[in-house]
Image (cartoon, helix red, strand yellow):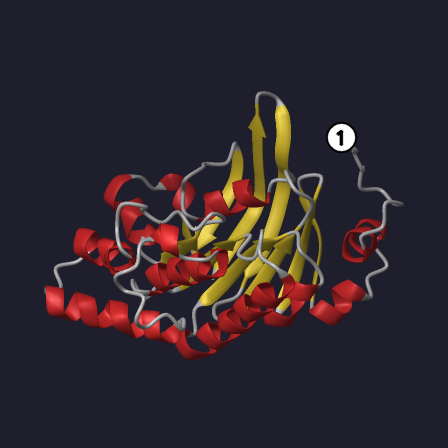
Amino acid sequence: MIELIDVKKSFNGLKVLDGVNLKIEAGEIIIIMGKSGGGKTVLIKHFIGLLKPDAGQVLIDGEDITLLKGKKLDRIREKFGFLFQGGALFDSMTVLQNITFPLIEKTDLDIETINDRAINVLTHVGLKGAEGKNPAELSGGMKKRVALARALVMEPDILLFDEPTTGLDPIIRASIHQLVKETHKKFGFTGVIISHEVPGIFEVSDRIAMLHEGKIIEVGSPEEIINSSNPAVRQFVTGSIEGPIATIFY
């Protein structure tokens, strides 16, 4: 379980998180939505101790990680997998090498076991046979699948997705949504998805939380969020330019 208690974070005097309170139950998938640049990525970086709050607590399975450092913090981080927005694949490595890299670096498994685990997750994401390809040979959707396989190969308890479908066309986006659902059903991890692409991604979630002006202003089921009476939530879900969320044209 993940719990944030009155988490605050500022950069150069600018408040990004202003008293965030949120509880994420083990085994659920929750989407944290909000406008671009609104602090969503900053928020999930607190989950794994990449950022420390100026105030507040970040509890992972009841342990406040803001008090941890070194090996104790590393032990908590081992619970997590992270799917970066851009995939973050190593261009100089093949698909198989990208996936086996964390196992080689962080475990004492023999190479046969490592390769078997890599092939298993590649098969799950629909890319068996692509082991020898380089990232430059892959489409955007395939890169997302490889990145997911790399996150899964460490068998994390919690998987963080940072904008997993950004830059993909609607058909590929829908296929990634379906893959996330199938992956969650098979592996049973706790999933946290950061996204501003709504409401399409709602289909993969148990709950949605709205981050606005540094606070979680509403949490609910997809149906509850779609039917919310909160003006900011309604504006974001419908994509209206009218409402409390400032619209800036460049």
Q: Of all residues shown, which one is farthest toward the right? A: 242
- Give how far across and how far down residue 132 sits, in percent: 25, 61
Q: Residue at image x 25%, y 54%?
A: 102
Please give the name of the residue rendered at 68% of the width and 44% of the height, measured from the top-left corner: 215
Q: Which quadrant does the C terminus fall into?
A: top right
Position of residue 63 relative to residue 201, above or below, is above
Residue type, mark 1 in image: Tyr
Q: Residue at x 12, y 64 (%)?
A: 111
* Residue 189, position as x, y percentages in the image: 43, 69
Between 17 and 248, the one nearer to me in the picture: 248
Of 141 and 66, the residue lying toward us: 141
Tell me what residue is drawn at x 12 percent, y 69 percent. Answer: 112
| 163 lies left or right of 121 | right
Does any portion of residue 100 appear in the rendered image?
Answer: yes
Taking the image as shown, residue 111 lies to the left or right of residue 218, namely left
Q: Callout 1: helix, strand or loop?
A: loop
Residue 180: x %, y % from top left: 50, 69
Instruction: Identify residue for label 1.
Output: 250
Residue found farthest to the front: 137
Q: Residue furthest left?
A: 110
